[in-house]
């Protein structure tokens, strides 16, 4: 199974059922392996941490709304924030002595 993210990646949350969770920037801190995710079945899940303590993720656990700065998120709900490996990285050229004359 190909995963979207890797350990240590920064990622953005997508496809969340809870609108408040959409667009959160998180860091992947551990793999939780395959977990049952309500309404989706078994999914690979990462343990993530929000980058800011003022941002949190909202979870509904046993009917109660809970907000946490760290918790599980399925890989399917994350997109990594790094350029694809086949994408060229543009480097600004430094002026040379000749171009300054």
Image: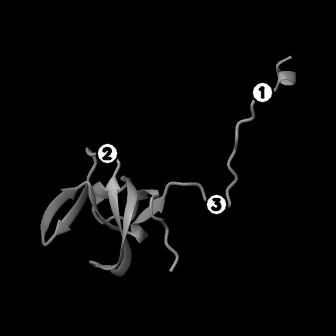
Name the residue tied to disc 1. Answer: 95
Above or below, comparing residue 54 to residue 78 in the picture = above
Which one is in front, 30 or 67?
A: 30
Q: Residue at x 78, y 27 (%)?
A: 95
Number of marks: 3
Above or below, comparing residue 31 to residue 83 in the picture = below
Name the residue tied to disc 2. Answer: 52
Q: CA distance from mark 3 to mark 1?
A: 28 Å
Above or below, comparing residue 83 to residue 54 in the picture = below
User: Which sits earlier in the primary sequence, circle 3 or circle 2?
Assistant: 2
Q: Residue at x 42, y 70 (%)?
A: 76
Q: Give the crowd class for mark 1: few <14, some 14-19, many >=20 residues within 10 Å.
A: few
Above or below, comparing residue 93 to residue 38 in the picture = above
How far across and how far down the image is residue 47, in percent?
33, 65
Q: CA distance from mark 2 to mark 1?
A: 38 Å
Q: Give the crowd class for mark 3: few <14, some 14-19, many >=20 residues within 10 Å.
A: few
Q: Is residue 7 left or right of residue 39?
A: right
Which one is in front, 80 or 18?
A: 80
Q: Secondary structure at mark 3?
A: loop
Q: Secondary structure at mark 1?
A: loop
């Amino acid at each position: 199974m190909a995963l979207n993210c890797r350990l240590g990646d920064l990622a953005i949350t997508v496809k969340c059922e809870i609108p408040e969770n959409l667009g959160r920037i998180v860091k992947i801190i551990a793999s939780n392996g395959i977990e049952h995710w309500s309404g989706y079945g078994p999914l690979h899940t990462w343990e993530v941490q929000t980058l800011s303590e003022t941002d949190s993720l909202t979870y509904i656990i046993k009917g109660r709304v809970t907000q946490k700065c760290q918790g599980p998120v399925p890989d399917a709900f994350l997109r990594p924030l790094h350029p694809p490996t086949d994408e060229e990285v543009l480097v600004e050229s430094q002026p040379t002595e000749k171009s300054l004359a």
